[in-house]
Image (cartoon, rainbow, N blue to C red):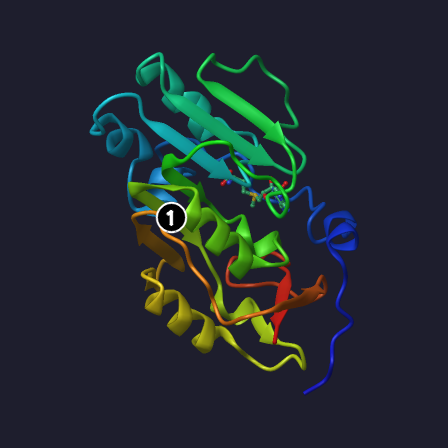
Amino acid sequence: MTERALVSLTALERSSVVANNTMNRERGLTGVNSYARELGLDPLTWLSARPGAPSWLDLCSGEGRALREAAPALPADAVLTAVDLVGPLVPLPAPPALEEVVASVSVWEPTRRYDLITCVHGLHYVGDQLGLLARAASWLAEDGLLLAHFDPDSIRRADGSAAGRAAVAALRAAGFTYDARRHLLTLHGGRTIDLPFTYVGADPIAGPNYTGQPAVGSHYT
Ligand SMILES: C[S@@+](CC[C@H](N)C(=O)[O-])C[C@H]1O[C@@H](n2cnc3c(N)ncnc32)[C@H](O)[C@@H]1O
């Protein structure tokens, strides 16, 4: 195996793979180009069935269209949080329930727990994907739902060898289910997770993943 030149968080987030303006950042709530289609679940229907004020955290939210579309149909005290490294490129006034945070999900921390946490085709650009999944699991309500697209092929050992099978096995042992057809991880119920992987750095030239877009390689010991 060839050792790859791994980069730091700052270098990764400045790299062309993350600052890629051909990414699909515009998925809406339902329809052809949507969260409902990618997740196999309509977030609004799921949130509407919750008692009380529902909360939804969307990591790597792009333009935040799905949350903007959901907000008017939810109770006024619903909490919707969208986090993206660059935020919406088309700035529009946000509905009152929606907080748009411009930050890296690799360092951002919430101040509350959420009923629903989504990461729709966002992990592909994150260096420490397994670390983010573990952190997100701890931000989930006791009976909450976490959904995230995940490509096991992007998980590598420090020497570049494949670690995807081991990562999926560790995620399953921690309570996630993985749908290989949809490339989708699901977790029911917040929890503390300790995955047996230590992050060593990101490969910004790992090449295209299953989406056809260039993606990041995440390397672990
Ligand atoms: C393929 S787009 C998906 C956007 C949105 N989820 C959707 O489906 O429309 C990936 C998004 O991840 C964001 N992103 C990449 N790295 C990030 C990071 N470290 N922290 C927060 N957002 C990040 C990008 O800015 C981009 O908006």
Label 1 CB less than 8 angstroms from ligand 1: no
Q: Residue 74's spot in the image, x, y percent?
A: 31, 18
Residue count near mark 1 (Cα–Cα under 10 Å), binned few <14, some 14–19, many ≥20: many
Q: Quadrant of the C terminus?
A: bottom right
- Residue 46 pos. (x, y %): 25, 34
Q: Amino acid at mark 1?
A: Leu
- Quarter assignment of residue 193: bottom left
Visible in this render: residue 158? yes
Residue at screen point 60% across, 29% down = 101
- Above or below, comparing residue 123 to residue 51 in the picture: below
The quarter of the image holding the N terminus is bottom right
Residue 92 shown left or right of residue 133 in the figure: right
Describe residue 131's horizontal placement relative to residue 5 as left or right. left
Position above or below: 88 against 202: above
Residue lying at 49% horizontally and 63% vertically, measured from the top left? 151
Res. 180 in view: no
Ligand 1 sits in quadrant? top right
Residue 25, horizontal then vertical, whole percent:
56, 38
Spot occupied by residue 186 in the image (x, y as percentages of width and height): 33, 54
Residue at left 67%, top 34%?
86
Please give the name of the residue rendered at 44% of the width and 25% of the height, measured from the top-left corner. Answer: 80
Q: Is residue 32 left or right of residue 142?
A: right
Q: Secondary structure at mark 1?
A: strand
Could you say which is closer to the camera, residue 133 or residue 190?
A: 190
Specify the quadrant of the image occupied by residue 108: top right
Query: Which residue lies under the disc numbered 1?
Result: 147
